[in-house]
Amino acid sequence: MLDRHVFLVGPMGVGKSTIGRVLASELNVPFYDTDRVIESRTGADIPWIFDMEGEEGFRLRETGVLQDLVAEPPCVIATGGGIVTKPANCELMSQGLVCYLTASVEQLVERTSRDKKRPLLQVDNPREKIIEILAARDELYRGVADVRLNTDRFSPKAAVAEILAQL
Ligand code: S3P
C-alpha cells in the first residue's frame, strides 16, 4: 500500500508522464498529470493559457491543481517542468516522495522536438533554452528530490523498476 504521494519532477521531455502512468499502474493507484488536469479544468490547452494569462497565470492554476491533488488519497503525480519555480509548490510536495528524473540535453531536445505544446520552447534555439532552463532549475529539483534517476539508459518500464526499488 502506498502511504504517500509520489511526485515526478524534472525538465520538459524527460518522461514524467510516461513513467508516471506505468508507476501508478504498478502501484495500483490513480495517476495525475498537472498539465492535463489544468487543461481539463479550463477546457483550454497549455499554449492558449500562456497566451491569454501569461506564465504567471498558468503558474497560479498549476499551484491550485497541486493543492487539490495533494488532498487526494496517495497517488502518482507527474508535474509540469516549472513546478519547482514556486516555493509554495515545493512545500506542498514535501509531504510525499519526490522523484527527480533527469536526462541528457540531447535526449531532452530529441523528445521535445516533435510537439508544439510547450510554449517555453517555441523559440529559435530550443536546445539553448533547454540548457538555460536546466541551469536555472537543477538546484531547485535537487532541493525537493528524495530520489534522482537518469532515464537515458532506461525504458519507461525499467525506470519504474528503479523507482520502485527506492520506494
Ligand atoms: C513547463 C513545462 C510543461 C508545462 C508548461 C511549462 C516548464 O510541462 O507545464 O509548458 O516551465 O518547464 P512538461 O514538463 O510536462 O512538458
Image: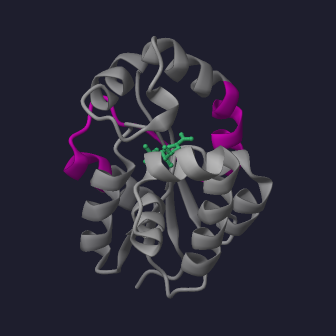
What residue is at 70 percent from the left and 68 percent from the top? 92
Q: Is residue 142 above or below residue 157?
A: above
Figure colour scheme: one colour
Horizontal side, residue 5 vs residue 91: left or right: left
Q: Is residue 102 above or below residue 161?
A: above
Instruction: Answer yes or no: is residue 145 visible.
Output: no
Check if residue 152 falls in the magenta segment. yes
Give 38 or 100, whichever is nearer the viewer. Answer: 38
Q: Could you say where residue 87 lies in the image, as x and y percent from the top left?
A: 79, 54
The magenta segment: 136-160
What residue is at 33 percent from the left and 35 percent from the top? 116
Q: Could you say where residue 95 lies in the image, as x and y percent from the top left?
A: 67, 72
Q: Could you say where residue 66 lies in the image, as x and y percent from the top left?
A: 60, 69
Instruction: Answer yes or no: is residue 161 visible.
Output: yes
Check if residue 135 falls in the magenta segment. no
What residue is at 56 percent from the left and 64 percent from the top? 97
Horizontal side, residue 143 vs residue 148: left or right: right
